[in-house]
Amino acid sequence: MTTATLEVSPAAPYWTGSVHPGEVAPGDDWTVGEPLRDHALRTQISAALHDVALLPGFEAIAILDEDRDFATLGSALDTAHDQLARLAGSHQVAVLAPALARYVALLSELARLRVHLAQARAAQRNARYAATRNALSRLHGVDSVEQMLERAPAELAKCGFDRVIVSRVEESTWWVENVHVRADPEWASEIARVGRENPAMIDHLLIESEIMRRRAPVLVRDAQHDPRINAAIGQASLSRSYVAAPIMPDGRIIGMLHADCYNSRRHVDEEDLAVLWMFAEGFGYAFQRTALSERLRGARDEIQRMARDIATAADDLCTARTVLGAPRLRADQNDAPPVAVSLAANSSIETLLSRREIEVVSLMAEGMSNGAIATHLVISEGTVKTHVKHVLRKLKASNRAEAVFRYMRMTAVHGTARTPRP
C-alpha cells in the first residue's frame, strides 16, 4: 500500500523565504496572533488530527500544542482535510466500504471543526473590539490631560496587549510620556526612563517617520533586527515585534501609541494592528475633548479672576476721596506716561516679542492656562512657563492679566499681531 504523509503546516510565514529572525522558527514557542481560547474546541481539533494521523496510509505526526494560534490550527485542519479527501478518492479506499465510511466521517468532522474554528475566531475578534470600545468609553470620563496620558496605556492593554507606550510628538521629536507593562510596573518605569532619556528626532531613519509620512499605523515584524527602531527603547524593552499608530484628532499628529504582546510570547499580526488603529482614532478624539474641556475651565477661571479684579478696581474708584485741584506728585513720581501707554505709542508687538511669544500671549488672551497652551502648541508646559516669563518681562507686566491688557492695547494701536498657528 502507498504511504502518504500528513504534513501539518505551521503558522503562515512571518517573512517569505527562509526562516527570518522575526519568524516563529522550529522549536520557538512564540506564536503569531491570538491563540484559540476555547479549550473544548482545541481538544476536539487535537483529537481529530490525531485520529487522521493514525489512519492506514498516514505516518504519525506531532500533535499540536493546545494553545496554538488560529493560523496554525486552520492550516493543520486544511491540510488534513485536503489530503484525506484525495486519499478517500483513491481506488484502494473506494473498494473497502468500512474504510471509506471512516474516511467520510473524518472528513465531515474536519469540515465541522473548520467552521467552528472560523466562528470562534470571529467571536474572539468581536469580543476584542467590544473591549476596545469599553476602554474608550472609560476614558471619556477623564477630565484632565495628565490623567488621560496616565490611564490610556493601561486601558489599551485591556484590549489584548501586554505592553503599551504613549508618546508625544513635539517639534519633530518623539518623547515618551508613559509606559504600561502588565503585571510588571518596575519594567514599565525602566522603559519609560530610557525613553525619556533618549528622545528621538523623527527623520527618515526611524520607523516613526513612516507613520508621520503615511499618517497610518505600521506593523514592525522584527524589532530586534530592524535598524530603524529607537535602539535604546528596543534594548530596554526586548520587543520582538510591535504595532504603532499615530494620534491625530484634528488631522495633525500630536503623539503615538506603541504596543506588543511580549509577556504572552506571541508576535503581533494584522488583527492587532486593526485594534490599535481603532483605539488610536478613538483616543485622539477623547484626548481632544479632554484638552478642550480643560482649556475652557482654565478660561472660565481666568475670566472670573479678571472680573473680581475689575470689581475691586471699580469699588476703589467709587470710594476714592475727591480733592480740589490737580493731585500733587510724590518725590518718587515723574511726568513719564504710564508704561502701557508708552509701550503702545512707541513700539509694535512684533518688535518686542518673538513669534513664539506672540503665539503664547495671544493664547493667554483667549484665557488658556499654561497646560492648555502647551497642548495647543505641542510643546512642554515648562517651555510655556519660560515664554510667559519672557512676555511679562518684555511687556513690563507684573501678572498675566496685565500682560494681556498691554498686548491687546498694542495690537489695537499698531494693528493685528500674528495669530498662533492652528
Image: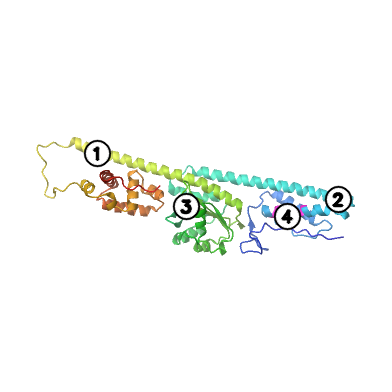
Residue at horizontal 30 percent and vertical 45 percent from the top: 416
Q: Tag 3's secondary structure?
A: strand
The residue to which callout 4 is attached is 76
**14 sits to left or right of 44:** left
Count neighbours of disc 4 (C-alpha within 10 A) and say few if under 14, some if 14 to 19, many if 20 or more: many
- The magenta-colored residue range is 72-81
**Tag 2: amino acid:** Leu
Please tell me whether residue 209 is drawn above or below residue 422 in the rendered image: below
Residue at horizontal 58 percent and vertical 43 percent from the top: 130
Q: Position of residue 261 (x, y in %)?
A: 58, 55
Outermost residue to the right: 95
The residue to which callout 2 is attached is 100
Precedes in sequence: disc 1 or disc 4: 4
* Quadrant holding the N terminus: bottom right
Label 1 – label 4 distance at C-alpha: 81 Å
Does the stretch in magenta take in 348?
A: no
**38 sits to left or right of 93:** left
Q: Of tags 1 and 4, which is closer to the observer?
A: 4
Does the stretch in magenta take in 76?
A: yes
Label 2 – label 3 distance at C-alpha: 61 Å
The residue to which callout 1 is attached is 312
**Tag 4: amino acid:** Ala
Label 2 – label 4 distance at C-alpha: 22 Å
Count neighbours of disc 2 (C-alpha within 10 A) and say few if under 14, some if 14 to 19, many if 20 or more: some
Q: Tag 4's secondary structure?
A: helix
Label 4 – label 3 distance at C-alpha: 41 Å
